[in-house]
Amino acid sequence: MFTLALVGCSNDDFLTTQSDEAKVVSFSIGTDMPQVVSKARDGYRDWKAGDPTSFGAFGMYDRNFANIDKLFSNQRVERVGSAWTYSPARYWADYTWCQAFDFFGYMPYMDADTSEPPAARNGVKFEQGGEGHENEYTLSFPVTLGDAVTSTASEVPLICHAPVHKTVVGDVINYEMDQVLTGFSLKFMLGTKMTALRDFVIKGVKIKGAADEMPYSGTVSRTYTYAPSNDSWSSGDVTWTDITNSTTATEFTVLFVDHDGDKTIYDNTNSTLRIGYSDPVETVADARQWGNPFYAIPSASFNPTIEVKYDVTVKDENGNFIETRENITSTIEFSNGYFTDYVSGSVGKIHPIVVQIVPSYLYVMADADQRASWIIVQE
C-alpha cells in the first residue's frame, strides 16, 4: 500500500466546495497520508497540492442501482482552486423525497468504456452483484503507470475506502480514499564492524528491472457489501487482476531529497548522504533514509535490482587513512517475498527497505566489496 501512519480527520479537516443557496451536492476529499511506517492504515489527511486533481463519482439513492444514472455515474469532478467542481450541477432540493444516499469514487478520473458488447468493456465499471449477491457492489478501473515505478503523488490511483452513506440532504460528500499501489522507502546502515574502517558517501540509487519483470498496468477492484440488518457497509480488499508487465527494461532513479538537518550527513549541494566511522549508524532504528518513497503495482513479478552508487574512504585497523575509492556501484537483488502481505490486498502501507553495507572481506579492498550489500527488511 502507499504506507502510511494516518491521522483521522473530522469533517472540518477537509477542503470543501462552497455550496450556493440552492445547495449544490458538493464534495471533499481525504487521502492516504504517506509516511514511513510498518503498520496498516489508520487514518487520513485532507487533500493537498500534488495529489490527483480529479476523481470519478458514482451515487445512488435508496440503494437502487437503477438510480445511478439519475444521480452520479462516473461523474468527472475536478479541483479548481480550493473547490471540487462538476457540471451539470446536482441540487439536493431535487432529492428531498429520498430516504438514503450512497456515494462511491476513485482517483484520478478516467473515461468509462462504452463499447459494445458490455462484457468486452475494460474501462471504469460500477456493477451490482448477481442473484443472491444483490447487496454487493464492485467498483473497478484500469491503471497504467507511465513507468513501472513512480514517486509522483498525482499519478498514484486511489479508491474509496468505503461508500459515503447519507440520510440527510444538504451534507457535503466527504470521501476517504485509499491508494492502491504499494510503497517502499530506502534506508542505509553499516554493519557493526564497518564503522571503524570505512566512511561511505551515497551518491545515487536506481531501481532497475529487466523486460517482462516489472508490472506497469492492471485492473483495480474493490467490492462493497451492504448489510440491511444494521444499515451499514463493509469494504473488501483492494484486488489487482489482468496485470501486464513492461516489455522493455525499466530504470527508475530514486532522487535525493534536501534535508534541513546536519549538513555533514545530508549534503544538499552535492545531493549525497554520508554514513560511516565518524558518525556510525549500526541499528535499523537509526538507518538513514534516501529520497522519497516510491510506488509500484503489488505483483509477485516485482523483483527489481537496487543499484547504489557511492564513494568509500578506507582506514586501516589503527584508524590511519588508506585511500578513497570513488563511484563504486553495488547491486542488490530485491525480492517482494521479504514482505508477507505484499500482494494480500492490504492498503495504506510503505515497506521500509533497509540496506546494510557489509564487506565480503573486511580488510581487503577487492571487487567483492562492490557487491557487499545486504537487505534487512523491517516488518
Image: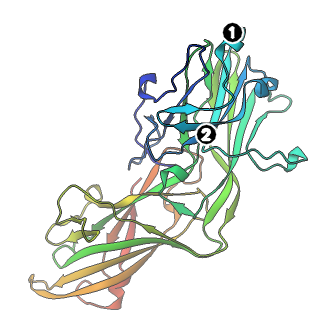
User: Where residue 55 is drawn, which disc sits there?
Assistant: 2
Q: What percent of the width, then of the height, locates residue 264?
A: 16, 66
Quick one: label 1, few (<14), some, or many (20+) residues within 10 Å? few
Q: State which tag comes first along the sequence, 2 or 1.
A: 2
Q: Amino acid at mark 2?
A: Phe
* Residue 180 as seen in the image, left or right of residue 255: right
Determine whether, in the image, residue 144 is placed left or right of residue 42: right
Q: Is 86 positioned to the left or the right of 242 in the image?
A: left
Between 335 and 17, the one lying in front of the other is: 17
Crowding around mark 2 (Cα neighbors within 10 Å: few <14, some 14 to 19, many 20+) is many
* Residue at left offset 67%, top offset 12%: 93
What x and y, as percent, mark residue 145?
60, 59
> What is the three-letter code of the residue carrying label 1?
Thr
Q: Secondary structure at mark 1?
A: loop
Vertical position of residue 375 compared to residue 369: above or below = above
Total tally of numbered discs in the picture: 2
Q: Is residue 270 above or below residue 369?
A: above
Displayed quadrant of residue 236: top right
For residue 96, the mark is: 1
Discs 2, 1 touching: Cβ within 8 Å: no
Q: Position of residue 354 (x, y in %)?
A: 36, 62
Residue most extreme to the right: 117
What is the C-alpha distance between the residues marked 2 and 1? 25 Å
The image shows residue 250 at horizontal and vertical percentages of 56, 72
Q: Quadrant of residue 61?
A: top right
Q: Is residue 166 visible?
A: yes
Q: Is residue 197 left or right of residue 95?
A: left
